[in-house]
Image (tube, rainbow, N blue to C red):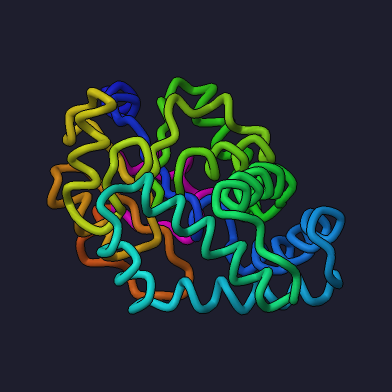
Amino acid sequence: KKNERMKNYTLFIDDGGVMNDNSLRGPQWQRLVSEFFVPRLGGAPSAWAQANFTVITEIMEPAAWKARMEASPDYLSFDRTYQYDWLSRMCAIVGVPTPEREKCIALADEATNLITRRVRSAFPGVVEAIRMLHSSGYTFYTASAEPSYVLEGYLEGMDVLHCFTRLYGPDLIDMHKNGVEYYERIFAEAGIAPENALVVDDSPSALRWATQAGAHTVHVTSTHAPAEHAKFHIGSLAELPTLLAECV
């Protein structure tokens, strides 16, 4: 009976900080950005690598990111503006002409789709854990702040894309991952009762929102105090199969 209850959970997994190590992604992005854009737009590889680091650091600054989210009427507008700003600011730093807006967005999209498939940043044991749970009958979704096309690239690169039913990022539900409504929307869109959802995340805020939406939660953390809102705590996603076998 315990195993039957265990398999009733549908898994909603965060990406950065849970499946993939963000500290490994940055240097790979810098190298791959230069490999992509130098042949297309010119400039020095080192200049592109430094430009990517500088621009992403500026864009992801918490106050700037919050203002960016609040300024967009919908997620599509947010994403298009983000892609244009990302590439146009890098062009300015590198010292090459910025393509006109639509071409710039298309080129940024092309770069993102290629780069995400080439990045290798999964935490140890994560790929094996996902495959094991999938083969055991678990249903997987993502629950990420990244859009679905970015998640598709990363998961394809990890060779676990086939394990996921749908890749929930903000683009599929037109809602940023910044409150309880994000989880309410993905559960409703997936047709999953919140009490049957198990959300796995490294962010205490995300876990609080998921709990408020009615889901069960697992906090993945090896360096911070366990989130008080989380039902379970593990040091790595690689530990999830053991947790589900023994504790749920």
Residue 243 sits inside the magenta stretch:
yes
Position of 93 with respect to 129 (left or right) is right
The image quarter in which residue 143 lies: top left
- What residue is rendered at 30% in x and 21% in y? 4
- Residue 79, position in %: x, y? 43, 51
Position of 212 with respect to 2 (left or right) is left
- What residue is rendered at 35% in x and 36% in y? 172
Give the camera-side residue of 233 and 194.
194
Give the camera-side residue of 129 and 143.
143
- Residue 35, position in %: x, y? 83, 57
Position of 62 with respect to 163 (left or right) is left
- What residue is rendered at 83% in x and 61% in y? 38
The stretch in magenta equals 232-248
In the displayed structure, 25 sits above or below 161; it is: below
Position of 83 with respect to 10 (left or right) is right
Residue 58 sits inside the magenta stretch:
no
In the displayed structure, 190 sits above or below 64; it is: above
